[in-house]
Amino acid sequence: MPSWVGRSIDRSLRNLGVSRLDVGILEIDLKGTESATTLADVDQVYDFYARAAGDVLATGVVERVFAYCHSPQHMATAMAVETVTGLAAQFSPAEVWPRVFFAELEKRGLPFFGMAPLWRGRLAAAGGRKGSPVVRPLVWALSHPQVTRAVLTMSSLDHWNEAMAAAGSKYDLGCERADFEAWGLEWPADRLTQAVRVA
């Protein structure tokens, strides 16, 4: 793992033209992991995050290590690793499970990166009730105060401009249910939704 980590960091430094990195994000390769049993083994998941975080920090050129998590189990495990100081996960109206952890993240002061708030482009095509199809799901994701940053890919200058406009917009939580229906998503009428409404 140390050599793999070193190569990845060197490539990032070259591509960005910098000498240091603020954040290194660790992600378990779901496609490359042959055994599904391994992915469900909490001890092995913990070992991956702990060893990889140690290897990243040992390079001396990365300030902080975040864990990119694909499931609630992986996020709970990553939060137990002392050297993991931030979390990241897919977070969109179609993938609301990270909200389970928001209260604990806020309590511990851990940053959270919401990845793919447009559900890897699918919500951009869905439209929503009103306004830009790109803006509404992104504004929804950013309306959660625990979301430190949202990370998405952009395919055009228009897409960039829409995303920048979303960053300065406010989301009306009173419209959330109608938006979910317009996006063709099941309304998550559960304690997570209620917790966000109260907050």
Image (cartoon, rainbow, N blue to C red):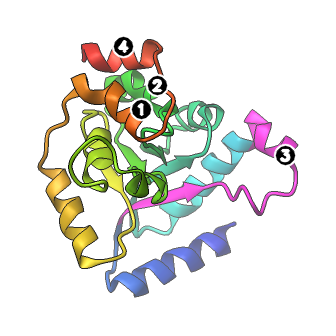
> Which amino acid type is shown beneath numbered disc 3?
Ala
Q: Which residue is mark 2?
A: 187
Q: Which residue is mark 1?
A: 181
Q: Which residue is mark 4?
A: 194
Residue neighbourhood size for the residue with mark 2, other residues' Cα within 10 Å, grouped as few (<14), some (14–19), many (≥20): some
Looking at the figure, which quarter contains the N terminus?
A: bottom right
Distance, label 2 to label 3, CA atoms, is 30 Å
**Left or right: 140 in relation to 102:** left
Looking at the figure, which quarter contains the C terminus?
A: top left
Question: Can residue 100 be seen in this snapshot?
Answer: yes
Residue shown at 67%/40% (left/top)? 46
Q: Which sits in the foreground, 86 or 60?
A: 86
Q: Which sits in the foreground, 12 or 181?
A: 181
Q: Which residue is mark 3?
A: 36
Of the two numbered discs 3 and 1 on the same chain, state the one appearing first in sequence: 3
Task: Estimate the x, y position of residue 169 in percent, counting from the top left.
Answer: 13, 45
Distance, label 2 to label 1, CA atoms, is 7 Å
Choose mark 3 or mark 1, whichever is in front: 1
